[in-house]
Image: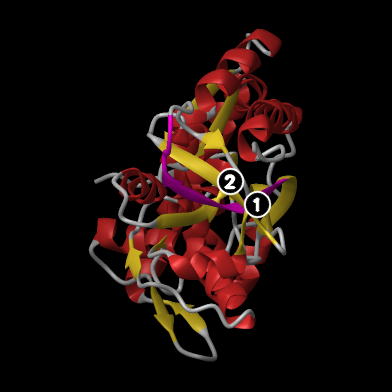
Amino acid sequence: MNITLRQLRAFLGVAKYQNFTKAAEQLHVTQAGLSASVRELEIQLDTRLFHRTTRSVTLTEGGLSFLPAAQRTVEILEATALDMGVLGAQQETSLRVAVTPLIAASVMPAALREFAQLAPDVRVSLVDTPPQFVQSLVASREVDVGFGAFFEKVSGIKREAIFPMELVAAAKLAGRRPNGSIVKPLSWPDLGSYPLILPPPGNPVRELVDKHLRERNVGTAGHITVGHLETAIAFAEAGMGIAVMPSMVLGACRRYKVQIHPLVNPVVQIDYYAITTTGGRDLATVRRFADVLTRCAAPLFRTGGAAA
């Protein structure tokens, strides 16, 4: 059995307010995260804790039996942690960060080195995970901050744009240029001459690309669908088509024999965000780390003009 303090707090919140939405607001988590915590606890205990209908949420017999033990456990844990000074020390000396694997590999080594020099007493824990899990880790407060291109607002999550990216096209390297070279721009109609390597339907980047192609009546020479940005870069290196992606890939492209074409007429910008929980702890270290990440990532995320 592996019951967590997060699960117990979620259970006590729903028991108190008899409403998942109200409990999520008071605990400063998303309703989806709160519901997941309660479900996890029910699985651990092998019993239903609440009767749920569209109009009400009430404790089951099992929930009523478990309630006093849950209250005592949370009270003891929180009191002990405060007595030992653990909570305050953790807030001052640790930072839990979630990013996608591509950013973890291309940007985080430099960011972590610089941050370690600026804040040597802060221990940074890094989780590299797909973007949908970055958001869920933030919502459940398993990490303090997440970074990524999050297109939609989510209840209980604060988004702060820290710098812009743009859509670019990666193609097989031509000539003796260095890997990841920035070469002449392509306009959106130019893409009609090539097979395109794109994210799957429903992906926000795919929807953005389809929108701009459709608005300009640009047909394509077919397309290949891939689920990961690094796969798209590898396919472009193999000459299978042109990969259209956010410019967060520029650092990773230096590991592949590809060249980067800025996409113009129009340039399409996408914001890169830092996300935290609404009402979560507002650490100065979160802002300091975001500033360091911005300095390290911004040069890699911008084309800075095109070569001839």
Secondary structure found at label 2: helix
Q: Position of residue 57 (x, y in %)?
A: 50, 81
How crowded pointer 2 is (Cα within 10 Å; few <14, some 14-19, many 20+) is rated as: many
Q: Position of residue 5 (x, y in %)?
A: 46, 45
* Range covered by the magenta-colored residues: 164-175
Name the residue at 45% across, 67% down.
193
Q: CA distance from mark 2 to mark 1?
A: 5 Å
Name the residue at 58% across, 33% down.
79
Chain-order first, disc 2 or disc 1: 1
What amino acid is found at the position of numbered circle 2 in the picture?
Answer: Ser
Question: Vertically, is 49 above or below 87?
Answer: below
**Image colouring:** secondary structure
Question: Disc 2 marks which residue?
Answer: 247
Q: Position of residue 77 (x, y in %)?
A: 50, 36
Q: Position of residue 303 (x, y in %)?
A: 65, 40
Question: Vertically, is 96 above or below 209?
Answer: above
- The image's mark for residue 166 is 1
Q: Is residue 120 left or right of residue 207?
A: right
- Residue 31 seen: no
Does residue 174 belong to the magenta stretch? yes
Front-lying residue, 269 or 256: 256
Question: Vertically, is 255 above or below 250?
Answer: above
Name the residue at 68% across, 13% down.
119
- Residue 297 seen: yes
How crowded pointer 1 is (Cα within 10 Å; few <14, some 14-19, many 20+) is rated as: many
Residues marked 2 and 1 touching at CB (< 8 Å)? yes
Does residue 132 belong to the magenta stretch? no
Question: Vertically, is 146 above or below 55?
Answer: above
